[in-house]
Image (spheres, rainbow, N blue to C red):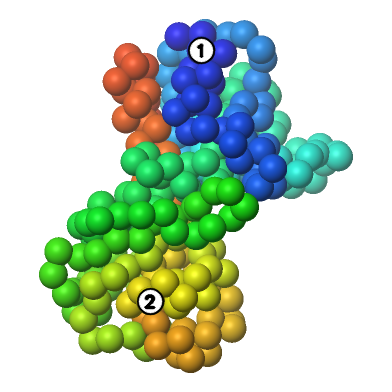
Amino acid sequence: MELAELVSRYDDRLRTDAFADVDASANGLQVGPDRREVETVAFAVDAAAQTAQVAAERGADLLVTHHGVSWGGIERVTGRQYGRIAPLVNEDVALYVSHLPLDAHPELGNAAGVADLLDLDDREPFGELGPEHLGQRGRAPEPIPTDRVRETLESELDHFGQGVRVLDFGPEELEDVAVLTGSGTDWLDEAAAKGVDALVTGEGKGKVYHEAREAGLTVFLAGHYATETFGVRSLQSLADDWGLETTFVDAPTGL
């Protein structure tokens, strides 16, 4: 498949253009020629020297990631920035990135994947950012004890042995759950205003302890990396359906 065709398919499915004014990430094709043939695609959460090198070793023509190498523009390609881009250029591996579009997608996205894992129903958008929403809110089929949610997240997510931290200030059993992966505690006030029982996210800032306690809300900190593998795996499944060879580069951080 031509690289331009693959990029166009992903951009259309993910509504990449809709996030141009709200996302610091330069979503879409970040590294690569205008035209080339793609047969093998590698997928990873982060575009880093490690994942780029592994993608090259596996013969990938394209690396697709959630976190890319360009955040608001690149002024100089030196130091760490050079270390990330050089393996891509030297090994002729293109880079496609989808940050907030992949968080937000109602079916392919990271929040959707966590909501599927928790079997949430009656879903609606959550996590307002400008005209878009980055997460989902849903209801459990029946009330779930907090410990069971933690056990599910710990057993199913790749948290690199770090476990799941729980700020347990909500009800003993949870029904209404908001999900915003990665660094989602900035939306705790929205979760409280909507009356949810719990917020599932990746990592939190120091202030979230008191904010959650004062709001009477349970917060699950399940790992930034761990909660954001779902989207790139969904994009891998699409590539499989389109007849491409694919591979997943797992590089968990424990963070």
Quarter of the figure with residue 124: bottom left
Q: Residue at x 25, y 52 (%)?
A: 116
Assign a secondary structure to mark 1.
helix
Asked whether, in this view, residue 120 is left or right of residue 33, the answer is left
Tag 2: amino acid: Gly
Asked whether, in this view, residue 82 is left or right of residue 232, the answer is right
In the rendered image, residue 35, in percent from the top left (x then y), is placed at 62, 8
Evaluate whether residue 235 shows in this view: yes
Asked whether, in this view, residue 243 is left or right of residue 82, the answer is left
Quarter of the figure with residue 153: bottom left
For residue 151, above or below residue 40: below
Q: Which residue is mark 2?
A: 195
Q: Residue at x 24, y 64 (%)?
A: 139
Asked whether, in this view, residue 208 is left or right of residue 126, the answer is right
In the rendered image, residue 83, in percent from the top left (x then y), is placed at 71, 40
For residue 7, above or below residue 19: above
Which of 111 and 127 lies nearest the eye of the viewer?
Answer: 127
